[in-house]
Structures are given as structure tokens and as C-alpha cells.
Amino acid sequence: MKIYISGEYFEKENAKVSVFDHGFLYGDGIFEGMRSYDGNVFRLRDHLDRLWESARSIQLTIPITVEAMEKAVNETLKINEISDGYIRLIVTRGRGTLGLDAHLCQHPQVIIIADHLALYPKECYEKGLEIVTASTIRTNPAMLGPQIKSMNYLNNILAKIEGHQAGCAEVLMLNSKGEVAECSGDNIFIFKRNRLHTPSPDAGILEGTTRRVVLELAAELGMNIKEAPMTRHDIYTADECFLTGSAAELIPVVKLDGRTIGNGLPGTVTKKLLERFRAETKKR
Ligand code: PXG
């Protein structure tokens, strides 16, 4: 495996960053997780737009152009001969001192890792996931915008640990108002009374690229769409529920907190949207 670090490729064992990098010391950096299909990165521009937005928000200057980044991502994929895979793109603040001063970090580091995918087992798509609500509340946007895909994912990791302890592969996170926000690494949708409903960005979520594609596809299908606050009551009483993420695509959820959603099986609308989504990934 060859890993791209700021313009050079290193073997996995030699791909290293400084312990003085503020990404390591403070989680001061940003990232993207992307998926490639048949050698093409799905919605690469959307991911790069979000990366640049995250950078702007934390006052981090990405040291290369969008075009150069696009080229580097595609090249890393090619060099590693990965056609259907997962790409992690990271930009750290770079090496500094032990103090918090970001201005002492002169050289932000760009890291690109292309790997094989670690997917949810096929069975999860056939039977649907069972999830629980975490007691860990999603970061309050008044403190740190969840739309920044920062290298500090402790909030989500603590929630995911709770999920794991409950025997669940994903976990639901509420915001500080008690509304549904999203899952630890996926956005959430329900289908109820003929309407597709997902929390709006105001709920304090990471606006997923997959979420956006699903909203586009639902609009093309003429579906009734609601981006509005959601509570757990809405999920408990929904006909269908599913999660979206670059790695997961669309994955059905059939139980929340031990309660069966709908008839307890992946729903027809979920299946239809997944089918449309997969067709979208094949478009060139
Ligand atoms: N919400 C959060 C908090 C995320 O981290 C998504 C939603 C979905 O976004 P996309 O753009 O992928 O549709 C994410 C995705 C993982 C993993 O292993 C996922 C993410 C980050 C790190 C790991 O599933 N981000």
C-alpha cells in the first residue's frame, strides 16, 4: 500500500507524521471519507467542496489547489490498483510546538490513503440494522459546528462505543434539544405517511454527501420530502427507516431501542432508493 503525504508516496510502514503535528496533538485538522466505484471516486467534487469548507471554517489553508487534490486522489487510487475502495483524505494543521498556537504550524500536511472497503455485512442489508440511542449528545453547533468534518471525532467515537456495548453496529445521536441529529457516522432518514423525512442541517449534523444524493434521487422520483426537526417518536412510529453514508450507501434500520420499526423488515421505499443510488454510482 502506497500512501500519499504532501506530494510523495510512502509504503504503509514508512507513512508517518510528526508527533508535533497539531492533527495528532489536538485533532486540529479535517478529513473526508470517500468511496470509489470501478476506479472512479463517487461525487469527488462534493467531498472536496466540503473539505474546503471545513478548512475555511477552521482557518486552515489547504496547500494545494482543488485540481491538484483531485489529481492526487485519483493517482493514489490508481497506484494502489484499487477500483472499488475507500479513500481517506486528511489535511492536518501540520507540525507546530506543544502550545496551541496554530500560526506556528507552517506546513499543513495532506495525506491520502486508499484502502479496500470494510463494509457492513450483506446480512445487515437483507435484515436491517438494530440500533440504540446513545446517551452521548451530538456536539452542540454553538460550540463546534458538526458540519466541520474535523479530526476530532471523540463525540462520535464515544457514542459508537455505547452502540458497540449494546451489540449494535451503529448508534443514534440526539442533539442538545433532544431531537434526532444523526448516527455516529451516518445520516438518518425515515419514511412515514408517504413522506421522506430527514433532520435538517439545523439539527447539528454533518451534511452527508450520500444524504444529498438521496434527497436528489427522492426529488427525481417525485417524493414528498421533509427536512425538519425529528424526534424519536417519529422513528418509533415510522413505516421505514434507513441510514446513509459513503461506506454504507443506504442501510435499512428495523429496530431502535428495542422497538420494531414498521413491519420489522427493510422497506420498499428504502430498497427502491438503494437501487436508484447504486445505479447513480455506475453513471460515468
Ligand atoms: N454523519 C457523520 C457524523 C459522519 O461522520 C456521515 C454523516 C455521512 O456522510 P457521507 O458524506 O459519507 O455521506 C458521516 C461520514 C465510517 C466513517 O467508518 C464515516 C465517516 C467518518 C469516519 C468514519 O463509517 N463519515
Image (cartoon, rainbow, N blue to C red):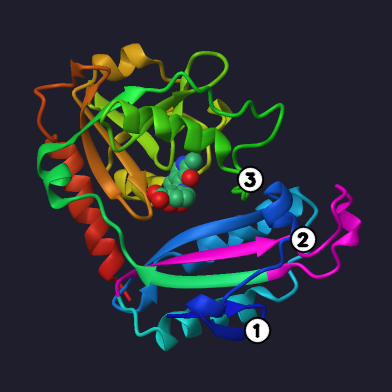
Q: Residue at x 77, y 60 (%)?
A: 20
Q: Is residue 125 shown left or right of residue 149?
A: left
- Residue 239's x, y, as percent? 18, 23
Between 30 and 157, the residue placed more toward the observer is 157
Give the answer, above or below, for where 278 lies relative to 122.
below
The boundaries of the magenta stretch are 84-109
Q: Label 1 amino acid?
A: Gly
Instruction: Indicate the secondary structure of the residue bearing disc 3.
Output: loop
Q: Residues within 10 Å of mark 1 (few under 14, many from 20)?
A: some
Q: Quadrant of residue 83?
A: bottom left
Q: Is residue 34 shown left or right of residue 18?
A: left
For marks 1 and 3 on the same chain, the one whose residue lies earlier in the sequence: 1
Residue hosting label 1:
7
Q: Residues within 10 Å of mark 3 (few under 14, many from 20)?
A: many
- The nearer-to-camera label among 1 and 3 is 1
Q: Label 2 amino acid?
A: Phe
Residue hosting label 3:
148
Q: CA distance from mark 2 to mark 1?
A: 20 Å
Q: Residue at x 45, y 26 (%)?
A: 173
**Is mark 2 in CB contact (under 8 Å) with mark 1?**
no
- The reply to whether residue 221 is in sight is no
Q: CA distance from mark 3 to mark 2?
A: 22 Å
Give the answer, above or below, for where 159 lies relative to 103.
above
Between 87 and 197, the residue placed more toward the observer is 87
Residue hosting label 2:
20
On the rendered image, what quadrant is the N terminus found in?
A: bottom left
Q: How many marks?
A: 3
Per the image, is 96 magenta? Answer: yes
